[in-house]
Structures are given as structure tokens and as C-alpha cells.
Amino acid sequence: MIFYFILKAYDTANLAPSTLSVSTSFIAVYLTFRRSPYFALFYAANDIVLIVLWVLSSMEDVSYFSVVICFIMFFANDIYGFCNWQKMKKRQHSLTDKENIEFSEK
């Protein structure tokens, strides 16, 4: 992807995971714009990549470990958000189905 070449031009450390992080973030933003419930899965994928990147940084400087905890919480929040989107979807379809049945009976 184009992100690889941009990040390479800036001499980014951990180029492959960084490219994956930017790519998953870009897709997540696009899906958010499209109001797709799958946006949260791409944010969760991005969180996993960021957790790995920050763990690698924490191995060199332990003061970065708090950022790992932060992204673990973001991951949990993204999974929670996706699950709730799915629950709302089921609830809305259930209500729509009931309304359609009532309308067809009239």
C-alpha cells in the first residue's frame, strides 16, 4: 500500500507493523464514515498492532508500559462497542419485523 512508502520515506521504525497499523486505522475510519458496525473490528485490529509495537518499545524503556495498558483498554472498548452494535442491530430488526407483521395484518 501507499502507506508503506510514506512511512519508509520518514524512516519509520518497525515498518511492517507500522504500515499495518496505519492501514487498519484508515479502514476503520472509512467504515465509521459508512456507519458500518465493522469499524470497531478494524479499530480492535489496530489496537492489537499498537499493543505489539508498544510492547516492543517497552522492552527498551519500561516507562512505555503504561501505553500498553492504555491500548489494551482501547481494545476491550472496541470489542464491547462491536458487540453492542450487533445487539442493537438484532433489536432493531426485531422491532421492524413486528411492525411489518402488524402493518400487513391491517
Image: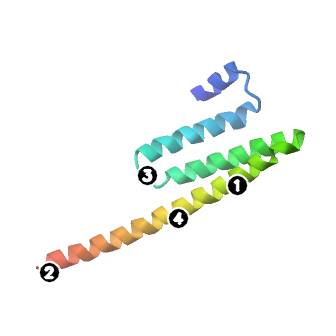
Quadrant in the picture for residue 9: top right
Q: Nearer the viewer, mark 1 or mark 4?
A: 1
Above or below for 20 versus 86: above
Marks 2/1: CA–CA distance: 50 Å
Question: Residue 83, labelled with which disc?
Answer: 4
Q: Amino acid at mark 3?
A: Ser
Q: Amino acid at mark 2?
A: Glu
* Mark 3 element type: loop
Question: Residue 105, labelled with which disc?
Answer: 2
Q: Answer yes or no: do the residues labelled 1 and 4 have beta carbons within 8 Å? A: no
Looking at marks 2 and 4 on the same chain, the residue that comes earlier in the sequence is marked by 4
Above or below for 64 versus 44: above
Residue that badge 1 annotates: 72
60 sits to left or right of 53: right
Marks 3/1: CA–CA distance: 23 Å
Q: Where's residue 45, x and y in %?
A: 63, 49
Q: Where's residue 50, x and y in %?
A: 70, 44
Q: Residue furthest left?
A: 106
Q: Amino acid at mark 1?
A: Ile
Q: How many marks?
A: 4
55 sits to left or right of 41: right
- Image quarter hosting the N terminus: top right
Residue that badge 3 annotates: 36
Crowd class of label 2 (few under 14; some 14 to 19; many from 20; radius 10 Å): few
